[in-house]
């Protein structure tokens, strides 16, 4: 169970981006984080993942404070895929995905039989096993995104955070990635949190919605009842 209570996010007390954030998610939830550009979605994702300090409130995963965990332990609980493009020369897809095993390998980075088994499993799940010997920088945008998600999946974390995972992808690649994420969330009982501007897709695939409204209200909506109307009415505020 992931819980956030009375969280304020930003850079310092004079630069509060958003406050009074309360949320919850449990294994099997696929969460869409929605809001206009600049509202603070990426800042919230970085705060939940522990990459950025919160200004107030608490974030707990299964009763453990995210802030209190050292980075190596946090990396076993939360994996992150950000929007920044990755440029790494002369690394194969398989070796790139193997970087996700860093929280479990020794300081030399030696991979065990268990590590190799997990890498092979993730290559198959993400449907990129045939690409494993290709150089990462020679992949298409869609293939790179699948490999980047595979690296995060290889960390075996109960929570996966993805900042706009389908941005700039064509319809085919977008659908394939969302299908894969939905299956991972459901079958592996992971919490997957995705920020997105693709409202129609998230309404189809996600079962929970976190809305950062232009009125600076944080709203959590579950996929039941008239969830579609509720999401749309809270996301778009009439002027």
Image (cartoon, rainbow, N blue to C red):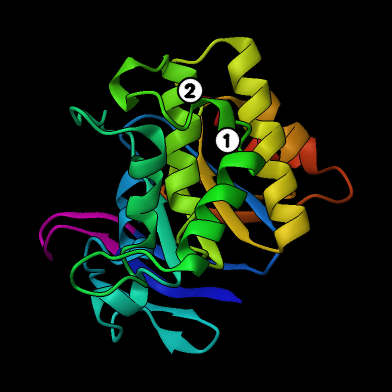
What label sits on residue 181 in the rendered view? none
- Graded by Cα atoms within 10 Å as few (under 14), some (14 to 19) or many (20 or more), the crowding at tag 1 reads many
- Magenta part of the chain: 9-18
Q: Is 202 on the left or on the right of 225, as rendered?
A: left
Q: Is 107 on the left or on the right of 221, as rendered?
A: left
| Residue of label 2 | 143
Q: Quick one: which residue is furthest to the right in this view?
A: 225
The x and y percentages for residue 211 are 54, 46
Q: Are marks 2 and 1 in contact (CB under 8 Å)?
A: no
Q: How many marks?
A: 2
Q: In the rendered image, is residue 211 in sight?
A: no
If the image is split into quadrants, where does the N terminus sit? bottom right
Task: Compare residues 81 and 120 and report the one nearer the observer.
Answer: 120
Q: Which marked residue is nearer to the observer: mark 2 or mark 1?
A: 2
The earlier-in-sequence mark between 2 and 1 is 2
Image quadrant in which you'd find residue 2: bottom right
Q: Residue at x 45, y 29 (%)?
A: 145
| Residue of label 1 | 235
Q: In the rendered image, is residue 201 in sight?
A: yes
Whether residue 49 is situated above or below residue 208 in the rendered picture = below
């Amino acid at each position: 169970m992931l819980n956030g209570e009375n969280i304020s996010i930003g850079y310092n007390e004079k630069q509060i981006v958003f406050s009074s954030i309360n949320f919850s998610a449990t294994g099997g939830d696929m969460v869409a984080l929605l809001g206009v550009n600049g509202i603070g979605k990426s800042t919230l994702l970085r705060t939940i993942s522990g990459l950025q300090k919160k200004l107030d409130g608490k974030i707990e995963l299964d009763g453990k404070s995210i802030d209190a965990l050292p980075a190596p332990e946090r990396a076993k609980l939360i994996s992150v895929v950000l929007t920044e493009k990755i440029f790494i020369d002369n690394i194969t897809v398989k070796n790139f995905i193997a970087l996700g095993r860093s929280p479990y390998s020794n300081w030399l980075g030696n991979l065990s039989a268990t590590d190799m088994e997990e890498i092979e499993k993730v290559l198959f799940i993400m449907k990129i096993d045939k690409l494993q010997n290709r150089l990462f920088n020679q992949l298409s945008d869609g293939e790179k995104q699948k490999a980047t998600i595979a690296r995060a999946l290889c960390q075996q974390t109960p929570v996966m955070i993805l900042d706009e995972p389908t941005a700039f992808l064509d319809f085919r690649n977008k659908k394939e990635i969302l299908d894969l994420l939905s299956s991972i969330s459901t079958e592996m009982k992971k919490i997957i949190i995705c920020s997105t501007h693709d409202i129609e897709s998230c309404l189809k695939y996600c079962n929970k919605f976190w809305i950062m409204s232009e009125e600076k209200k944080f709203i959590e909506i579950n996929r039941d009842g008239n969830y579609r109307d509720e999401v749309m009415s809270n996301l778009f505020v009439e002027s």
